[in-house]
Structures are given as structure tokens and as C-alpha cells.
Image (cartoon, rainbow, N blue to C red):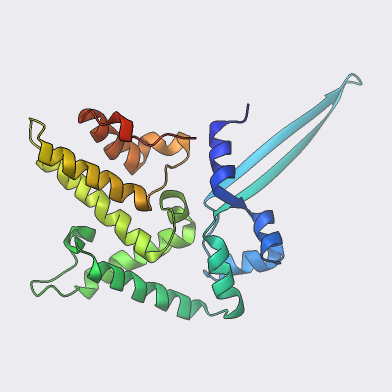
Amino acid sequence: MKDINIKYIEDNYLEAEEIIRIMNLNSDKLNQLIEDQLIPEPSYIINSEINISSPLDDNYRVVTSKKYFPKSILKLIADNILHHNPEKFKKDFRQNFLSSLKEHQHKTFAYGNTFDENGEIDLVKAEKALEEEWRHFCKGIYGICTLESNEEAIIEKEIVIKRILDFIETKGSVVTQEEINLLKDLDDEFNKVTSLFAPYQRETSSRGKYLDKLLKEFSLEDLIKEYE
């Protein structure tokens, strides 16, 4: 039986050689796109070792490494391969990030509230958050924890997690229907943007640390997302 973590990654991600075949690239071109920060680094790397032996008292070792990217990588490659412009790509990322943040209904939850008393973005705070999220994006982190790995998903995940943390801090000692309804809404919003994470990561992920535990606490175990 295949390991559950490998199955999860193979089912939900694209291996580098498959991407090269689909997009008609070569490995050098794929690596160049990563180096120029036009696409993120792989989200998962699976290193495997095979040992071969025989009755002749010999042995042979084969080591392989496979890199896996989120499926959304195909669109990024298609968008960036012709117009190879790293500066414009980061500029567009910045604009989309700030726009998604500014337009969000619950924007004040994000990044310790990046808005001033007039409801305008504090650019100093926002730029700091943006640069950190850009680094995470380029490292392939958002290919792990979001479904779409784009600016909107990054903002949505940040806000829904902060709202869940706020829920944990403010919930009463007695469960109310209002809290149950709010938790269901938060669960729905979380699932729209956030992945399951590989099984070995689940317990330490935001889903495992916060949402799964809350659903159990509120007797909503049937809403806990399971692996197929």
C-alpha cells in the first residue's frame, strides 16, 4: 500500500517532469523561471532510495528526487513564459495583494490591522507584510497551505485564521447556537481557500492546531475534512 503522504502529494500536485511535458519546456527553463521568481519553488520534494541486491552477494543503490508543484503552476508558467518580466510580475503581485486586502470585508483582522483611523492602508505595515508573503510565495509555502496559491488566497487565509483565533479568544464557556453558526461559517470560508496539508503536517498546521480542535469541541466532528 502506498504511503498516505506520498498519495496525497501525487494526487494533488504536479511533478516537475509532468509540468515540463505539459508545458513543452525543459528542466533548464523551469529552473530559470524559479530562479527569476516568476514561479515558486517546489512545495514538496520526495527523495527516494532503492537498494538492489542479489545472491551474488552484491548490491546497488539508486537515489532519486522528485519535485512537486501545485497545479496552479501551469497558469503561472503560461502567463510568464512569454512575457519574461520578473519586475512586472512582482509589481502585479503587490497591486493584487493590496487590492485584495483593501477590499476584504474583514480586512482589519489581517496582519495586526494595517489600516489607519481613516480606513486607509498603512503602507509601512502593509509593505512589511507584503515582502514576507512574497518570500513565502516564492519558497512554495502557499502551494502547500492554499488551494490556489495566489494573492487573493493569501489574504483570505490570513484573515480567516485571524478570525478563528479571535473566535477562540472570545468564545464563552457555554456553547451557544450563535457560536455554532459562526464556527460553521468560518469552517466554510477556511475550506474554500486552504488545503488539507499532507497528513504528516496536519497536526501542526493551522487546520490541525485550531479548526479541527474547535470542531471537536463544538461536537461538529462531521465537518472535519478527511483524506480520500
As rendered, which of 138 and 19 lies closer to the eye? 19
x, y percent for residue 173: 7, 31
x, y percent for residue 187: 28, 44
The correct choice, above or below, for 109 with respect to 225 in the image is: below
x, y percent for residue 200: 46, 34
As rendered, which of 188 and 66 lies closer to the eye? 188
Residue extending furthest toward the top: 55
Asked whether, in this view, residue 158 is left or right of residue 70, the answer is: left
- At a point 31% along the width and 61% down the height, the residue shown is 155
Asked whether, in this view, residue 83 is left or right of residue 57, the answer is: left
- At a point 65% along the width and 59% down the height, the residue shown is 19
Q: How many marks?
A: 0
Residue 73 lies in what quarter of the image?
A: bottom right
Residue 52 lies in what quarter of the image?
A: top right
Residue 93 lies in what quarter of the image?
A: bottom left
Q: Quadrant of the N terminus?
A: top right
The correct choice, above or below, for 89 with respect to 209 in the image is: below
The correct choice, above or below, for 119 with respect to 172 in the image is: below
Residue extending furthest toward the right: 56
Asked whether, in this view, residue 220 is left or right of residue 176, the answer is: right
- At a point 57% along the width and 63% down the height, the residue shown is 74
- At a point 34% along the width and 34% down the height, the residue shown is 224
x, y percent for residue 194: 38, 49
